[in-house]
Amino acid sequence: MADFSHLVIGAGVVGLSVAARLVRARGAVLLVDRHSATGTETSARNSEVIHAGLYYPPDSLKTKLCVKGKKMLYKTCEEVGIPYRNCGKWIVAQSDAEHEYLESIHEKARQLEIPTEFVRLSRAKDIEPAVRARKAILNSPTTGIVSSHSLMAYLLGQFEAGGGDLALNTAVSDIEFDSSRGLYTVQFNTGDEESTKETVSLKFENVVNSAGLSAPLISNMLLPREQHVTPYYAKGSYFSYASSQPKTQRLIYPCPAGHAGLGTHLTLDLGGRLRFGPNVQWVTSPSDLVPDGSQLEEVYAEVSRYLPHIDKASLLPDYSGIRPKITGPDEKGFTDFIIRKEEGFPGFVNLLGIESPGLTSSLAIGEMVHDMYNT
């Protein structure tokens, strides 16, 4: 006898999307999060960008789910009134090697039917006079920004309207699978104060691990040692900008400098204010969320390559987020999302390494997990 048909661990934007989709067809769904509110980790500490799907291998989950999720996200925002802006993005090249990189991105976008176009440098000066690109500019017109908090509030409303149950301040401490009964027994530590914490044990037919930064730790509770995953944490700090000049109408991205991120880019909030980030700083704790002001010189140097008239005195440390990596700084190459049923554990779906473009992909990930339970 199960207490719930499904447990979804982690109430970030991906967990909320999964839970909202499952509750429409699956009935008794429990969504838990170890924090006192939903979406307080990676989902609330990012650039809020709706990505086009340009950067990753064509057959990867990151590309497929980003492209699908982008369409779903724009449609949902328009239909239900979630604040968003389809502002577009320029990726700027300062060297011949970076120009060649943009050519490869443009060709990949053509094959995937993602709109991109090169902007003549002479014309770019009239459109965005503050932006410098020495070699080339690739325009991505389907890139945008969205209010992640409004999106999560909408998904939570859908989940609760469908009869789902949300338990906050509820951390998973152990998972066991009884193969003879086909049930998962999950222990939770509940409560927000040490003096009032309790241990609760419940049974589930199915479990979705969408715990973000904690997802490898949750997975390691259940899977055998040879299948354990090591979590890595790539901190990205953001810097606000206190001056009204220079201005841009769109997002500005440099060519990516490494495998950990897309470079320190210029993003806009929905009010049109500039912010810069995230940079990359490998840390040992997912709780290391204080922006590192000592990196301001490095951020200024990176940004001034494409925004030469930026005022360094107006750059201020703002906030930081942590990318939930499953490969470390010494491991080069591409790492895809892991979204899979784990062999030998029927009904257990693992979501590991759900970093960018996780926000853009969130609605498509919800559909994918739902469909996995129908196959």
Image: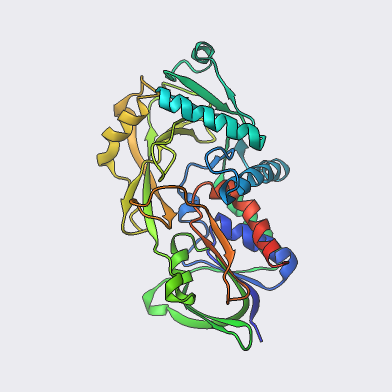
Residue 230 location in percent, x, y?
A: 39, 64
Q: Nearer the viewer, residue 233 or 313?
A: 233
Please identify the residue farthest to the left as the structure is shown. Answer: 294
Q: In this view, does 123 lie above or below 58?
A: above
On the question of residue 344 being in view, the answer is: yes
Residue 291, x across and y down, in percent? 33, 46
Q: Along the line of sight, which residue is nearer the eye, 242 or 208?
A: 208
Q: Which quarter shows the N terminus?
A: bottom right
- Picture colour scheme: rainbow
In the picture, the quarter occupied by the C terminus is bottom right
Q: In this view, does 225 lie above or below 269?
A: below
Q: Position of residue 371 (x, y in %)?
A: 70, 62
Please identify the quarter of the rendering in which residue 340 is found: bottom right
- Above or below, 242 relative to 43: above
Name the residue located 70 percent from the left edge and 66 percent from the top edge.
23
Residue drawn 68% across the image and 42% down it: 71
- Residue 73 position, x and y percent, is 65, 45
Q: Is residue 94 visible?
A: no
For residue 123, what is the image quadrant?
top right
User: What residue sits 67% from the left and 34% below the top?
Assistant: 113
User: Camera-side residue: 77 or 206?
Assistant: 206
